[in-house]
Image: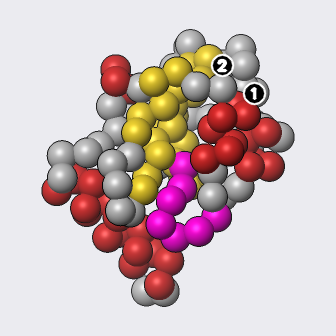
Amino acid sequence: MSAFPRILVLAAAASLLSGCAFHSFLAKRTTPPLLAKQAHADTTDHIAYMGSDANCHYFYHVRLFSIGGSLKIPVSELKLKHTFPLGHGEPRVVWNRDMLLNGG
């Protein structure tokens, strides 16, 4: 296993052990530019797409050394090419700002 997946697994485990996890009902509304500003391509801080429902796309901001956050953007404000129903797909990392701003 390379260093990146190992760190990703550690970050996920740390989130679960600390009681931090994605919750759609706690998701804070944000905008595409603000979410894109938070998207990084490094190994300690990234945005994961968690799925969509009829109203919103959901994301989880994973931070290795601090608490992450559940986020949502109305579907009318962000058009994504590849979506899946919330809770019925494998979360995927949004690698960079261009993926968010150009529909991932």
For the residue marked with disc 2, what is the amino acid? Val
Marks 1 and 2, Cα distance to the nearest angstrom?
6 Å
Give the image quarter of residue 24: top left
Residue 42 within the segment the image draws in magenta: yes
Applied colour scheme: secondary structure
The answer to whether residue 29 is left or right of residue 19 is: right
**Residue lying at 83% horizontally and 40% vertically, measured from the top left:** 102
Query: Residue 28 at what x, y percent from top left?
Result: 45, 24
Query: Residue 91 at what x, y percent from top left?
Result: 48, 48
Residue 102 within the segment the image draws in magenta: no
Vertical position of residue 15 compared to residue 42: above or below? above
Query: Residue 70 at what x, y percent from top left?
Result: 42, 34
Q: Which mark is residue 79?
A: 1
18 or 23: nearer the viewer: 18
In the structure shown, which secondary structural element does the residue marked by tag 1 occupy? loop
Report the magenta residues as a range.
Answer: 41-47
Vertical position of residue 31 compared to residue 91: above or below? above
**Residue lying at 26% horizontally and 45% vertically, measured from the top left:** 20
For the residue marked with disc 1, what is the amino acid? Lys
Vertical position of residue 85 compared to residue 42: above or below? above
**Residue lying at 18% horizontally and 46% vertically, measured from the top left:** 19
| Residue corresponding to mark 2 | 75
Q: Tell me the quarter of the image containing the C terminus.
A: top right
